[in-house]
Image (cartoon, rainbow, N blue to C red):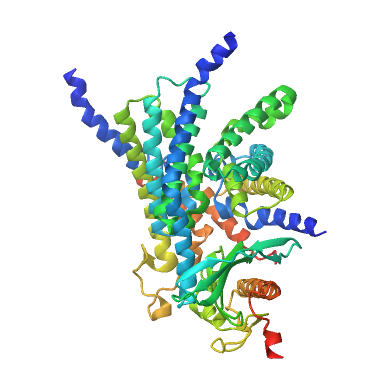
């Protein structure tokens, strides 16, 4: 009995304080979480909005799209449908990630409505070398993706960056970072395209042609 | 084979490429404090490795199996620091009782470790990197400890030799240690891009 | 009685100034090194970090000072940690809500304020022994001292790494026809370590410390 009394004597403040702090965190979280969620949505809309200028709002696709990750595991990807003011589908966007030069690179990729051409990508987070690898965020590199075919991309060391095709010209001094982005984008784009065609969300291009 | 590959990659990445001291600036305080002598440095490194492996694994389990299930991610920081403080206390008591000789060699560093940012830092980075399996989390935690030990031992070796060098009076002590750490981190940058 | 009342303002200003230079946490006490090095690649994150630290420091000093007579020795450190962790969580939420970009740049270094030695050191050395007013003044002094140091370090690094301070271009870049070639290493960990090392050396010269 005396042990319990001693325990209470020693720790009543701790217990009271834990409740008080718990309440404090809960109140702050309840007050701020809508704003935090809104911030996340706003950020994606801003980034993808720059790539798909006609897009007004984004709707998450309710069909599950699963792709095979590099480790052989299946991974869920949330694909968003970009709609114009009149509700027409103007494109698709999804997050893609993979390992870069120093750390993970996270991208948001936008593709046009028919999934034929890439509309571009934006870097969500990366830790590439300043001055070299982080030029993947620059216009010189990113503009090469604008309008490139949505399929396998290839990295070349010499070429004309202004010419839009499946060849992406590497950044001098940052071949590994350039290659990482090419791999991430082509991997995700081809896998998601295949899955979406299988599920009948987008038309099968080859069938239409024949 | 694939699992082994991922584990090995994770280990190397956290020891060399994302070394906590040189690229994430974690654990600088003990790094400046005890890197004067190589045996002290090794003791500290071992203590950190021990605690970081334990708490990295524990916090991963709590984060994935309790907090994420209940949607209580907002209390993550409070839980993490309590788990770490508790783990350090337990390890200290256990060691004093059952392994007195081990306690004598690096037990004195244990109380300092609770406020070592390397430990909490690693737990947070495990969440940030999105580690999916318990084994991966454990291996990376262990790797982080090894990386810290390596960094602090290299530094201690250099500092023992620095004692013989003619360092300008104003730079003696912490300043020259920081500058040396800078040069070391430059060397460690060479490891980036090793995994691809 | 009147004597102590006269002495109070002097004590307050002394406490405030101690944090700025004489007991500057980073430069003189070598506390809180990890945020000092990690977030000073540019001035804006450094300033944000400083504000977070001031907020947490003031709040935790208030709470610790209020319950200083109730603290039992066994649970003292645990209590401090709990208080600090709570306010760091709140600061992190506020940052996420109102400064989402900065929150992303700072990443895990915001929660790492929990283990920043400055805060627990002030709770132990000042707030658990002194009254409310002194504790708040001490927290503000220390916090501002820390923020100023961070900003100075960050200005040097940002200027040399990008030729800009607070994202305003100061030096004409060679790329745009000027003369300044960006010094990328300053933006990397190397720059942080070496700049801080040299800064500490400079402080030693100024104060005439000989070891």
Relative to C10, residue C141 above or below: below
Viewer-proximal residue among A130 and B9: B9
Location of residue C191 in the rendering, given as x and y in whole percent from the top left corner: 49, 59
**Vertical placement of residue B85 versus A186, above or below:** above
Residue A80, located in which quarter of the rendered image?
A: bottom right
The picture places residue A109, in percent across and down from the top left corner, at 57, 72
Horizontal side of C161 relative to B152 (left or right) equals left
Q: Residue at x 64, y 58 (%)?
A: B17
Residue A26 percent across, percent down from the top left: 46, 40
Judged from this view, the residue extending furthest toward the front is A86
Please identify the quadrant where the C terminus of chain B is shown: bottom right
Residue B173 appears in the picture as rendered:
no
The answer, for residue A107, to whether it is visible in the render is: yes
As displayed, is residue B168 above or below residue C83? below
Residue A150 placement, left or right of C193: right
Give how far across and how far down residue A150 sits, in percent.
63, 80
């Amino acid at each position: 009995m005396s042990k319990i009394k001693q325990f209470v004597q020693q720790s009543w403040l701790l217990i009271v304080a834990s409740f008080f702090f718990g309440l404090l965190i809960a109140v702050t979280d309840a007050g701020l979480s809508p704003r935090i969620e809104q911030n996340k949505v706003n950020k994606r809309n801003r980034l993808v909005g720059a790539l798909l200028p006609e897009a007004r709002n984004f709707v998450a696709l309710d069909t599950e799209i699963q792709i095979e990750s590099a480790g052989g595991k299946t991974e869920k990807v949330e694909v968003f449908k970009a709609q114009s003011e009149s509700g027409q589908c103007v494109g698709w966007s999804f997050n893609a990630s993979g390992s870069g030069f120093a750390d993970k690179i996270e991208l948001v990729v936008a593709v046009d409505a028919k999934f034929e051409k890439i509309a571009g990508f934006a870097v969500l987070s990366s830790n590439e070398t300043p001055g070299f690898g982080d030029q993947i965020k620059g216009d010189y590199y990113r503009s090469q993706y604008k309008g490139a075919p949505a399929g396998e991309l290839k990295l070349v060391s010499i070429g004309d960056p202004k010419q839009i095709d499946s060849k992406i010209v590497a950044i001098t001094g940052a071949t590994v970072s350039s290659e990482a982005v090419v791999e991430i984008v082509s991997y995700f784009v081809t896998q998601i395209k295949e899955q979406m065609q299988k599920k009948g969300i987008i038309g099968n291009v080859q069938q239409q042609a024949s | 084979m694939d699992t082994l590959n991922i584990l090995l990659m994770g280990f190397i990445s956290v020891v060399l490429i994302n070394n906590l001291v040189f690229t994430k600036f974690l654990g600088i305080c003990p790094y400046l404090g005890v890197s004067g002598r190589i045996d002290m440095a090794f003791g500290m490194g071992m203590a950190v490795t021990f605690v970081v492996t334990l708490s990295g694994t524990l916090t991963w389990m709590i984060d994935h199996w309790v907090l994420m299930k209940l949607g209580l991610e907002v209390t993550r920081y409070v839980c993490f620091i309590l788990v770490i403080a508790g783990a350090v206390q337990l390890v200290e008591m256990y060691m004093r009782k059952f392994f007195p000789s081990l306690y004598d060699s690096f037990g004195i560093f244990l109380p300092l470790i609770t406020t070592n940012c390397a430990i909490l830092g690693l737990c947070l980075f495990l969440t940030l990197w999105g580690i999916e399996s318990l084994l991966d989390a454990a291996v990376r935690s262990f790797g982080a400890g090894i990386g810290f030990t390596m960094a602090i031992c290299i530094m201690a070796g250099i500092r023992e030799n620095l004692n013989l060098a003619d360092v300008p009076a104003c730079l003696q002590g912490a300043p020259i240690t920081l500058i040396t750490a800078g040069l070391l981190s430059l060397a460690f940058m060479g490891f980036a891009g090793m995994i691809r | 009685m009147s004597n102590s009342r006269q002495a109070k303002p002097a004590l307050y200003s002394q406490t405030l100034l101690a944090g700025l230079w004489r007991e500057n946490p980073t430069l003189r006490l070598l506390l809180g090194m990890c945020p000092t090095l990690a977030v000073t690649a540019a001035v804006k994150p450094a300033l944000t970090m400083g504000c977070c630290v001031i907020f947490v420091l003031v709040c935790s000093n208030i709470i610790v000072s209020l319950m200083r007579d109730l603290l039992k020795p066994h649970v003292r450190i645990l209590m401090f940690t709990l208080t600090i962790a709570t306010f760091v969580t709140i600061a992190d939420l506020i940052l996420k809500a109102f400064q989402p970009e900065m929150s992303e740049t700072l990443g895990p270094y915001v929660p790492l304020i929990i283990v920043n030695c400055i805060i627990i050191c002030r709770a132990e050395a000042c707030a658990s022994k002194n009254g409310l007013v002194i504790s708040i003044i001490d927290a503000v002094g220390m916090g501002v001292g820390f923020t100023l140091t961070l900003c100075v370090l960050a200005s040097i690094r940002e200027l040399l790494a990008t030729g800009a301070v607070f994202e305003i271009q100061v030096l004409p870049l060679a790329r745009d026809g000027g003369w300044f070639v960006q010094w990328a290493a300053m933006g990397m960990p190397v720059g942080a370590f070496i700049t801080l090392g040299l800064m500490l050396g400079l402080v030693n010269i100024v104060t005439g410390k000989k070891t």
